Amino acid sequence: MLKTLAVSVAVTLATLGLTGVADAATTNYVALGDSYSSGVGAGSYLDSSSCKRSANAYPYLYASSTGASLSFQACSGAKTTDVINNQLGTLSSSSNLVSITIGGNDAGFSSTMETCVLGSDSDCKAAVDKGVTYAQTTLPGQLDKVFAAIKSKASKAHVVVLDYPHFYKIGGSCVVGLSDTSRGYINGGADALDTTIAKEAANAGFTFADVRPVFTGHEICSGDSWLHSVTYPIDESYHPTATGQRSGYLPTFKSGI
């Protein structure tokens, strides 16, 4: 009777779509994307490659805690073309879970931040506006190509698309550095980028997981930041710390599964 009941419950849950991606032991997980998925800034890097894949990054933490089989393809500096050309080789019909952060490098994130840190408020606004225009006009088509390529190679996979946090708490405790005006421009640029990512993820039938709510109160200048400000090595600036990956990106990713 108990065996019959268990089978009945399993069938019911499957019918309702409540069984999740798969049992952990059968989860074939592929982590794609840029430095926010590879774990730049989180330390404990797994190899000496320029991709800077971290044992503290959310994909590695998820796989380690669940026993999922992980193909860790995310790489620092990746653009949409890099994902298509270099990261999709391990995707297949047996892949049943995929995560990705992508789009920030295409929209000129690094150069925008450099301009805002070194330039005036007006310089910062011009750089952010340029990135916003790119995110609203050119990036959608690029994301569509990435998402279509993922769907083509792993049609049965549950795909979670994550975005980027606000970087600054306006009116926070920082006493030097960018003005609140420039900080506001940067946060607005992140919103524009995230809006595009959310729209294209929905068009592809993928799950969009927004990290902005969980990072609220943990931005730079908050007093409890989960993001690096300008730091050394310089490529780790404006990236999540190990805490940001563990307490910000990981639970957000899991909420999308």
Image: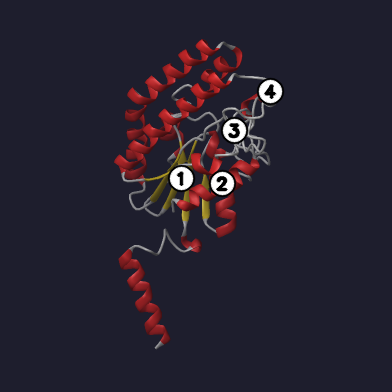
Q: Looking at the picture, which amino acid does disc 2 mark?
A: Tyr
Which percent across, then down, holds residue 146?
37, 35
Answer with mark 4 or mark 3, whichever residue precedes in sequence. Answer: 4
Instruction: Report the Cα–Cα distance between label 1 and label 2.
Output: 10 Å
Q: Secondary structure at mark 1?
A: strand
Dot 4: few (<14), some (14–19), or many (≥20) neighbours within 10 Å?
few
Quick one: label 3, few (<14), some, or many (20+) residues within 10 Å?
many
Q: Residue at x 49, y 52 (%)?
A: 254
Query: Residue 93, percent across and down?
Result: 36, 52
Q: Quadrant of the N terminus?
A: bottom left
**Distance of label 2 from label 3 (alpha carbons):** 13 Å
Tell which tag, 4 or 1, sits nearer the viewer.
4
Q: Please give the residue where the numbered disc 2 appears in the rendered image.
A: 58
Q: Earlier in the sequence, mark 4 or mark 1?
A: 1
Q: Secondary structure at mark 4?
A: loop
Residue 189: image location, x then y, percent: 46, 25
Residue under the image location 50 percent in, 47 percent down: 252
Contact check, label 1 and label 2, Cβ < 8 Å = yes
Q: Residue at x 53, y 50 (%)?
A: 251
Spatial CA span between label 3 and label 1: 18 Å
Residue 239 is tagged as 3
Labels 3, 1: front one: 3
Answer with mark 2 or mark 3, whichever residue precedes in sequence.
2
